[in-house]
Image (tube, coloured by chain):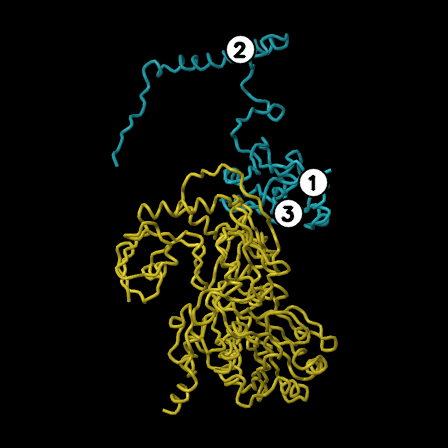
Chain colours: A cyan, B yellow
């Protein structure tokens, strides 16, 4: 391999004088100081509101705008009748490099849907946010566009999302009551299926 | 013996061989849907079209007899185009529901599209809608939309089971496979149509949505459902316990063996594997209180010491009720450790009467290794019955009664079992599953199932076949071989270092037992090998 020799930058005489360089730096500091001073006063009087005063975001009161392609916390898309759009093909579980997705599929009462997940968990403590699950999904059932970045919990257990939080990103743990009206396994119900197949069939094929 | 050339390579085949079989001999794969070596030739899918020199049109390889001097091209430009066009027609009305289809991953439509298709779809019309998710029988689910009408299932029910449940109805793009009115696909071999189906039209109900096929690991094995010993493939998942309610073994598929089961197996064997994951014994148990016969969890160390002490007491009288569910290796260890060294009387209860059978595969004896036990001299020469041993235990003529697998309540009745359990005789039970005898034993030693420990079975025709090790022993259970060797060490039986592992035990057995002379796991291979016939054995003994 060819070796490329990089010369260390040498200080010029002007730079070696030191004081002028400090003044150069202070010029930038003072420029921002007086600009912000002026703009903050102007904003008080309702002027120049289209120009941003500080460069610092006042997090968490003020959130930085997110780019639309940024991968943030997952969500599961929901059909019109309240069931998940996911058909339980388990491709995301297969492709997941961190193995953080757990799906248990079951027979859907509607033979044209055939399959749906009764359990869909993502362990965010393990997830690497690669977005492969979104790319591989043939039904566009999972997206990473909730804009939720502040994911924190006091236990590893609490880092696991189940169907509730995935289908409704507004929900934050702890989920107190189960509002999903199709049979599924969730922590709230102790892993039990909710409702009989007959009820579900009626609810899903003839939504009121 | 016509000689023909396929893709420039010459091959000699017997008269009447078809081109697809001749190509198979050369290792050239011609894609096919309707052709199956175990069924008659239908020639309706047209997928196996090849180019034949001096033929005006492409020919189907499955129904074209090889003739002298024939020149066949399977990879010419024309043959490739023909196959892609056929595939495009077959897929015209095929739904694109691979994400929810259980066949995805082992589907010939998917595979051949990637190998031989790769065209841009031109079918812009509405696909024909047919019925989905029809339960055609206790084991099989039919999806008419996915069917490509290869008629393999129809020919199977016509030719192999001769029950004729399936037929193809209507014409053109409305043609669909289905049951004749009033029929149900409930013959004893019904699930074979699922293996035959090259697409996702016929799928297994018990495997439905349980897992994706690419999660499955596969182990070559032998069915333990009856003495036929059909060759099988076990499909199991070990690293995703949320699937299939935690059961590790998901499905069993038949494996081709021309001398035993051809391509088929019965439903009884295919779906008779629940015991491997359900009601298993996973911990050593010890009786703590004689009066209430209460049992608590114990350790292997304590159990082996306890049983070993009882066995090695001077002049201990030992009875063993062996099981024809054990592998040859286990039975050989049992014979050597308990029989030869400790002088145990070994009984082998006969097969219960009334087992179903037919003239195809299903045998009345529902144990897989009775023949192997006989070759190993079990039961011993005095052939005590299980009942005689239990009677002896009740009468105080036995110090230790060791039961393998069997439920004594079924063998001798509840009354005698209880009597044997309260007597002086130490009742040791080792087996895989929980039942009435287990709670009565002094010691419960959980055994690994045959598919958790490898070994060999001898089928009803005397064919020695490998069981294979698909799973790890359940819970805290151990291989019979392993704890019998521990017992050997505790009772002063000369230790055999080369018995570590089933292959080592088999090698020793091949030296000691004439029927297995000269055999090894290598020579058995994946198709099995015949044990020495008894006449040859008799001659060998005379000379």
Image: A86 above or below A145: below
Which of the two discs, 1 and 3, labels the residue nearer the N terminus?
Answer: 3
Image coords of residue B101 (percent x, y): 54, 49
Query: Could you tell me which quadrant the C terminus of chain A lies in?
Result: top right
Disc 1: which residue: A175
For label 3, the SS is loop
Side of A4 relative to A157 (left or right): left
Circle on res. A22: none
Q: Which subunit holds the residue at mark 1?
A: A
Disc 2: which residue: A35
Towards the viewer: A19 or B41: B41
Marks 2 and 3, how far apart at CA = 63 Å
- Label 3 environment density (alpha carbons within 10 Å; few <14, some 14–19, many ≥20): many
Which of the two discs, 2 and 1, labels the residue nearer the N terminus?
Answer: 2
Q: Residue at x 49, y 74 (%)?
A: B457
Image coords of residue B42 (percent x, y): 45, 58
- Contact between marks 2 and 1 (CB within 8 A): the answer is no
Disc 3: which residue: A108
Kindly indicate the quadrant of the structure image that contains residue A50.
Answer: top right
Image: B69 above or below B288: above
Which of the two discs, 2 and 3, labels the residue nearer the N terminus?
Answer: 2
């Amino acid at each position: 391999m060819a070796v490329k020799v990089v010369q260390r930058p040498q200080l010029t005489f002007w730079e070696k004088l030191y004081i002028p360089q400090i003044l150069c730096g202070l010029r930038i500091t003072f420029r921002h100081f007086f600009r912000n001073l002026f703009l903050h006063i102007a904003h008080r009087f309702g002027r120049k509101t289209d120009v941003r005063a500080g460069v610092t975001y006042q997090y968490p009161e003020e959130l930085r705008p997110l780019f639309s392609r940024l991968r943030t916390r997952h969500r599961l898309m929901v059909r019109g009748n309240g069931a998940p759009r996911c058909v339980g093909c388990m491709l995301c579980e297969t492709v997941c490099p961190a193995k953080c997705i757990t799906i248990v599929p079951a027979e859907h009462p509607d033979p044209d849907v055939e399959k749906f997940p009764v359990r869909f968990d993502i362990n965010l403590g393990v997830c690497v946010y690669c977005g492969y699950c979104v790319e591989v999904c043939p039904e566009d059932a999972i997206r990473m566009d909730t804009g939720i970045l502040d994911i924190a919990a006091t236990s590893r257990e609490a880092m696991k999302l189940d169907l509730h939080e995935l289908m409704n990103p507004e929900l934050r743990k702890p989920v107190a009551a189960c509002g999903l009206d199709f049979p599924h396994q969730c922590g709230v119900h102790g892993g039990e299926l909710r409702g009989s197949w007959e009820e579900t069939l009626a609810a899903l094929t003839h939504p009121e | 013996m016509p000689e023909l050339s396929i893709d420039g390579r010459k091959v000699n085949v017997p008269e009447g061989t078809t081109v697809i079989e001749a190509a198979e001999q050369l290792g050239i794969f011609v894609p096919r849907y309707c052709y199956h070596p175990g069924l008659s030739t239908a020639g309706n899918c047209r997928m196996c079209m090849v180019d034949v020199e001096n033929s005006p049109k492409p020919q189907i390889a499955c129904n074209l007899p090889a003739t002298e001097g024939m020149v066949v091209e399977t990879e010419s430009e024309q043959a490739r185009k023909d196959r892609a066009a056929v595939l495009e027609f077959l897929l015209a009305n095929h739904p694109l529901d691979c994400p929810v289809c259980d066949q995805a991953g082992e589907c010939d439509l998917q595979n051949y599209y990637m190998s031989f298709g790769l065209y841009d779809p031109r079918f812009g019309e509405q696909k024909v809608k047919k019925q989905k998710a029809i339960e055609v029988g206790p084991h099989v689910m039919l999806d008419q939309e996915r069917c490509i009408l290869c008629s393999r299932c129809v020919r199977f029910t016509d030719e192999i089971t001769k029950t004729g449940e399936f037929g193809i109805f209507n014409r053109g793009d409305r043609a669909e496979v289905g049951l004749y009115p009033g029929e149900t696909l409930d013959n004893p071999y019904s699930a074979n149509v699922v293996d035959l189906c090259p697409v996702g039209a016929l799928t297994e109900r018990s495997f439905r949505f349980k897992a994706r096929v690419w999660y499955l690991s596969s182990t070559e094995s032998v069915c333990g459902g009856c003495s036929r010993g059909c060759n099988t493939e076990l499909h199991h998942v070990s690293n995703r316990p949320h699937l299939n309610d935690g059961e590790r073994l998901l499905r069993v598929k038949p494996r081709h063996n021309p001398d035993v089961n051809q391509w088929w197996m019965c439903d009884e064997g295919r779906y008779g594997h629940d015991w491997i994951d359900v009601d298993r014994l996973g911990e050593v148990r010890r009786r703590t209180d004689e009066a209430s016969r209460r049992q608590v969890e114990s350790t292997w160390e304590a159990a082996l010491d306890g049983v070993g002490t009882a066995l090695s007491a001077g002049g201990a009288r030992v009875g063993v009720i062996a099981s024809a569910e054990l592998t040859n290796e286990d039975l050989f260890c049992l014979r050597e450790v308990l029989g030869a060294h400790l002088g145990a009387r070994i009984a082998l209860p006969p097969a219960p009467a009334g087992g179903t059978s037919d003239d195809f595969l299903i045998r009345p004896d529902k144990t897989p290794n009775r023949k192997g036990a006989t070759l190993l001299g079990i039961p011993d020469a005095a052939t005590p019955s299980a009942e005689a041993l239990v009677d002896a235990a009740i009468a105080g003529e036995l110090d230790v009664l060791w039961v393998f697998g069997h439920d004594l309540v079924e063998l001798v009745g509840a009354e005698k079992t209880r009597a044997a359990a309260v007597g002086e005789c130490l009742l040791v039970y080792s087996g895989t599953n929980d039942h009435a005898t287990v709670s009565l034993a002094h010691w419960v030693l959980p055994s690994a199932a045959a598919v958790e420990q490898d070994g060999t079975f001898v089928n009803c025709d005397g064919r020695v076949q490998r069981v294979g090790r698909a799973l790890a022993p359940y819970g805290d259970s151990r291989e019979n071989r392993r704890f019998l060797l521990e017992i050997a060490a505790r009772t002063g039986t000369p230790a055999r270092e080369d018995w570590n592992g089933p292959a080592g035990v088999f090698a020793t057995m091949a030296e000691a037992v004439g029927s297995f002379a000269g055999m090894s796991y290598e020579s058995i291979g994946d198709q099995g090998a015949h044990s020495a016939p008894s006449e040859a054995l008799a001659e060998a003994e005379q000379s």
